[in-house]
Image: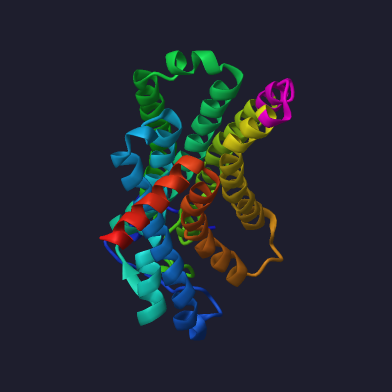
Amino acid sequence: MVSTTPAMYNLSSDHTGDFTLLGIPGLGQYHVWISIPFCFIYLAAIVGNSILLYLIAVEHSLHAPMFFFLSMLAMTDLILSTTCVPKTLTIFWFGPQKISFPGCLTQLFFLHCSFVLDSAILLAMAFDRYVAICSPLRYTTILTPRTIIKIAVGISFRSFCIILPVVFLLTRLPFCRTRIIPHTYCEHIGVARLACADISVNIWYGFGVPIMTVISDVILIAVSYSLILRAVFRLPSRDARHKALGTCGSHVCVILMFYTPAFFSILAHRFGHNVSLTFHILFANLYIVIPPALNPIVYGVKTKQIRDKVILLFSTKATE
């Protein structure tokens, strides 16, 4: 058996070469057609989240903790989709595209960091709803501007610290085989599998730490909503119960849209060996555009304050 010396790793771990992103395997001839709805959904995500951010910024009535967290969610969704979609559309329109190793690392860092941050923001929003419904008289004293900033900085720093090691885990790997990635964007495990070295640490960290972080968020969100439901069903009147549940409706919809496909994709990627690669990649591409496009629509439809401001915004534009 031939031993692998450090010198051999140094010779083969050149990170100056480019990677090639192929697109969706098996659907190359349909890339142009797939790009049409993909592009429109991405534009909807950009426009919807931009309108949401504009309204929250200019409308004083929306300067509340819930809408601050919603603006964070909108910004994170814009980062998530914009990190991947422009490159994906380039592949759909012009064929396989080159991406440098630093560019690949940058893309996967913002992709995974946005995912973990989205989860943390949903947890912060669940805490906001818990305080609003279970301790309404203490809402303004608990969620002060100082506390909200601390929460925002804390969850952002947590996401950064969780994903940053992924970059270092990849830079240590030698890439002496193919540099062709059968995907439309770079993601941690997909890039690690191209290495000609043991990637056990990448697999365990890549699946273990972020997933356990997200699972802990889900558990805490479930605890928050169980306490919310207990408080709601103790309210004396049906109207009061309906109003309290109505304030949580949009958040619950966004939670389901975020976590259901996320866990399905993760489990299929880890255990779904009979699931085709084409399905994996297609589903992964839909995940980076559909939730960011639907989130502002859900909040626009189900949140009265935002719905009224959107109607006022466009009616004002129409009369000018």
Q: State the residue at coordinates (35%, 67%).
A: 87
Most common secondary structure along the magenta stretch = helix
Q: State the residue at coordinates (48%, 82%).
A: 33
Q: State the residue at coordinates (32%, 34%).
A: 60
Q: Where is residue 28 in the image (x, y as percent from the top left)?
A: 49, 82
Vertically, is 66 above or below 284? above
Can residue 135 be seen by looking at this rendering?
yes
Q: Which colour scheme is used?
A: rainbow
Q: Position of residue 283 (x, y in %)?
A: 57, 64
Q: Residue furthest front?
A: 319
Pick whichever, 156 or 165, lies toward us: 156
Pick whichever, 234 or 129, lies toward us: 234
Q: In which quarter of the image is residue 225?
A: top right
Q: Position of residue 65 (x, y in %)?
A: 42, 29
Q: State the residue at coordinates (49%, 59%).
A: 190
Q: Residue furthest bottom?
A: 29
Q: Along the horizontal axis of the image, is 36 left or right of 246?
A: left
Q: Quadrant of residue 215?
A: top right
The reply to whether the magenta stretch includes residue 234 is yes
Can residue 198 be seen by looking at this rendering?
no
Locate the C terminus by quadrant.
bottom left
Q: Where is residue 204 in the image (x, y as percent from the top left)?
A: 56, 42
The reply to whether the magenta stretch includes residue 11 is no
Q: Along the horizontal axis of the image, is 281 left or right of 66?
A: right
Exactly how many numbered labels are in the figure?
A: 0
Q: From which residue to which does the magenta span run?
A: 227-239
Vertically, is 264 above or below 94? above
Pick whichever, 215 or 2, lies toward us: 215
Q: Along the horizontal axis of the image, is 305 left or right of 57?
A: right
Locate the N terminus by quadrant.
bottom right
Q: In which quarter of the image is residue 133?
A: top right
